[in-house]
Image (cartoon, helix red, strand yellow):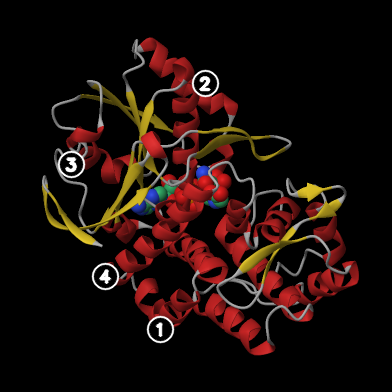
Amino acid sequence: MTIYHPAVPMRMRQVSVELGERSYPILIGDGLLQPGCLSAHVAGERVLIVSNDRVAPLYLEPARAAFAGKGVDHLLLPDGERYKTLATLGVIYDALMAGRYDRDTTLVALGGGVIGDLTGFAAATYQRGIDFIQIPTTLLAQVDSSIGGKTGVNHPGGKNMIGAFHQPRCVLADTRTLTTLPERELRAGLAEVIKYGLIADREFIGWLEANMAALRARSAAALEVAIERCCRLKARIVAADERERGLRALLNLGHTFGHAIEAGQGYRGWLHGEAVAAGMAMAARLSARLGRVTAVERDRVLALIDAAGLPLGPPAELPGRELRTHMASDKKVARGRVRLILLRGLGHAEVVEDYPEDCLAEVLCDAAVAALPA
Ligand code: NAD
Ligand code: GLY
């Protein structure tokens, strides 16, 4: 749906996450971050924008102006996944306490998924919960992490192990911010875009095949279409299963394999999206071995991941046996079985527990000789 925002004389797409009184809009468009455009989404008078030292020089001023009429301050954190910790969370609490921010404060996350997860968790917990708004500036954050209310930090023992569900009041995805995103980060975000097609939207797979070059060239029109479609799919899934009791688990396609790659590299190798892409390729191969997709369908998945410039298997230095060990410590292990998200045709996925272990082992070894990212 394309509508016109009263305060912003430009085209804007809007998707609603329907969660009763906690429902909220996702606003998507090129150049949306305009003076005053977010003021109406702030209930109180004070706003604290949390960003990092990489994103702030690019977008802090327009983000501040977006809250015209409110008292706006900001806090800058160091950049990087390694700072998604309880210690950094403490820095946000310290700023909130030092500034005497009350329960009517709105926290704003300006950045990628790291800033979004940290700021969201601070908002979920400060004074038992305050409002927050997401201004995601990576493709991954615009299609995935800013939506759905998963917030949290890493623990030395595992990624995202400490967190809370806390929905934002509004998400504003200005696709123009993606013009400054490093090429590798853009490709990593494309992995999550492809994921939505594979799990829930066969027609979107065809659209992606036709438009992958435009997305990689950062065509604003193509990005808007893709981001809206992904947000619509995620909004539907979150509305049906906010707390991940069932359906929402499908959003983890490729992630169990991907997390094993990330863990195997000590979280210092590939980007999350690159590991997820390799994981989706492995899930497609296993799905084909189990007769859940045809060889032609499997090859379409592999070709699409390849067209996005993403890897089709894990790094050669990670043997299948080692990957299997890391998979065993995944959050989705139940009764000793690793539950996998596998395809059933294209555009449909299921949680599967009863796959033959030798088929999984074969796929892990196959994949270990597959392509590396450029
Ligand atoms: P990120 O936040 O680390 O951002 C990637 C890099 O791009 C960073 O260096 C960042 O500073 C920089 N950057 C951000 N926007 C930019 C811009 N417009 N121009 C130039 N540089 C920019 O990584 P990410 O991929 O956005 O997010 C990954 C995180 O998201 C992980 O911690 C992951 O666990 C989390 N995540 C959360 C959810 C969820 O549902 N909450 C879902 C998926 C991923
Ligand atoms: N990115 C997975 C989820 O939001 O559930």
Q: Kindly identify which numbered label has been placed on residue 76.
A: none
Query: Along the polypeptide, which appears first: circle 2 or circle 3?
Result: 3
Read off the residue under disc 1: 210
Look at the numbered disc 1 and give the secondary structure of its residue.
Answer: helix
Q: Is residue 95 left or right of 281 when viewed as pictured? A: left
Read off the residue under disc 3: 37
* Label 3 lies in ligand 1 vicinity (Cβ under 8 Å): no
Amino acid on which the number 1 mark rests in the picture? Ala
Amino acid on which the number 2 mark rests in the picture? Gly
- Classify 10 Å Cα crowding around label 1: few (below 14), some (14-19), many (20 and above): few
The number of discs equals 4
Amino acid on which the number 3 mark rests in the picture? Cys
Q: Quadrant of the C terminus?
A: bottom right
Is residue 178 shown to the viewer in this render?
yes
Judging depth in this view, the residue of 178 and 347 nearest the camera is: 347
For residue 208, what is the image quadrant? Answer: bottom left
- Classify 10 Å Cα crowding around label 3: few (below 14), some (14-19), many (20 and above): some
Separation (CA) of disc 2 from disc 4: 40 Å
Query: Along the polypeptide, which appears first: circle 3 or circle 1?
Result: 3
Look at the numbered disc 3 and give the secondary structure of its residue.
Answer: loop
Query: Along the polypeptide, which appears first: circle 4 or circle 3?
Result: 3
Q: Is residue 322 left or right of 22 when viewed as pictured? A: right
Is residue 270 shown to the viewer in this render?
no
Q: Kindly identify which numbered label has been placed on residue 221.
A: 4
Residue sitting at 26 percent across and 62 percent down? 1
Look at the numbered disc 2 and give the secondary structure of its residue.
Answer: helix
Residue sitting at 83 percent across and 67 percent down? 355
| Residue 127 pos. (x, y %) | 45, 15
As drawn, the residue found furthest toward the front would be: 20
Residue sitting at 71 percent across and 67 percent down? 315
